[in-house]
Image (spheres, rainbow, N blue to C red):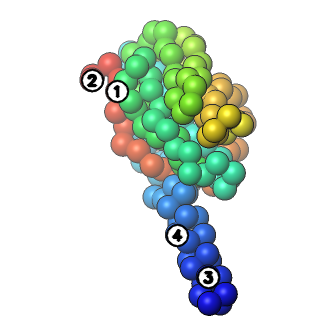
Amino acid sequence: MIKLSRVLIAASAAALLATGCASGPEFKDVASSIPTIKESQGRIYFYRSNSMFGAAVQPDINLNRQVVGKSKPGGFFYVDEPAGDYVVSTTTETEKTLTFHLDAGETKYVKTSIGLGLLVGRIIPSLESTEEANEHLQGLHYIGTPTTAAAK
């Protein structure tokens, strides 16, 4: 009976680990196929490090109140948007926001990271430098299709 319990626990843990992480091609495999930014637009990358801490917490990422993707451990995606002011928000037990201005031709990098919450972890968006983001993106998996919040 104890042996069966251990097997079930191990199988459950393996299933949780497999579903918690992003899958898809790595950044290095898709980087050369990412199109250049259109003249009137900027690009926003969203990414989350590959950590098992809080892996089950995968809320939607909203850009100006439109869902553009999910915060998945080990994943990244991007959206191309017109120049302007933007608010990124994530919601679990509380909403966390990040506000910034995007210029035409500019690329911004938004890292989402897990923080402690009362009942469930909180996903906190933050702007990162190009250098730091490029370092983190190297081991991450592409999890999205380019979309625009303005088109929705």
In the image, 44 versus 98, the foreground residue is: 98
Give how far across and how far down residue 36 sits, in percent.
43, 33
Which residue sits furthest front? 1
Residue at the spot 49% in from the left edge and 38% down from the top edge: 59
Q: Nearer the viewer, mark 1 or mark 3?
A: 3
Q: Nearer the viewer, mark 1 or mark 2?
A: 2
Secondary element type, mark 2: loop
Residue 23 falls left or right of residue 55: left
Circle 2 crowding by C-alpha within 10 Å: few under 14, some 14–19, many from 20: few
**Which label was assigned to residue 148?**
1
Q: Are marks 4 and 1 in contact (CB under 8 Å)?
A: no
- How many numbered circles does the render carry? 4
Which comes sooner in the sequence, label 2 or label 4?
4
In the image, 36 versus 8, the foreground residue is: 8
Which comes sooner in the sequence, label 3 or label 4?
3
Image-quadrant location for residue 48: top right
Q: Amino acid at mark 4?
A: Ala
Q: Nearer the viewer, mark 3 or mark 2?
A: 3
Q: Are marks 1 and 2 in contact (CB under 8 Å)?
A: yes
In the image, 14 versus 37, the foreground residue is: 14
Circle 4 crowding by C-alpha within 10 Å: few under 14, some 14–19, many from 20: few
| Residue 14 visible here | no
Is 28 rendered above or below residue 93?
below
Secondary element type, mark 4: helix
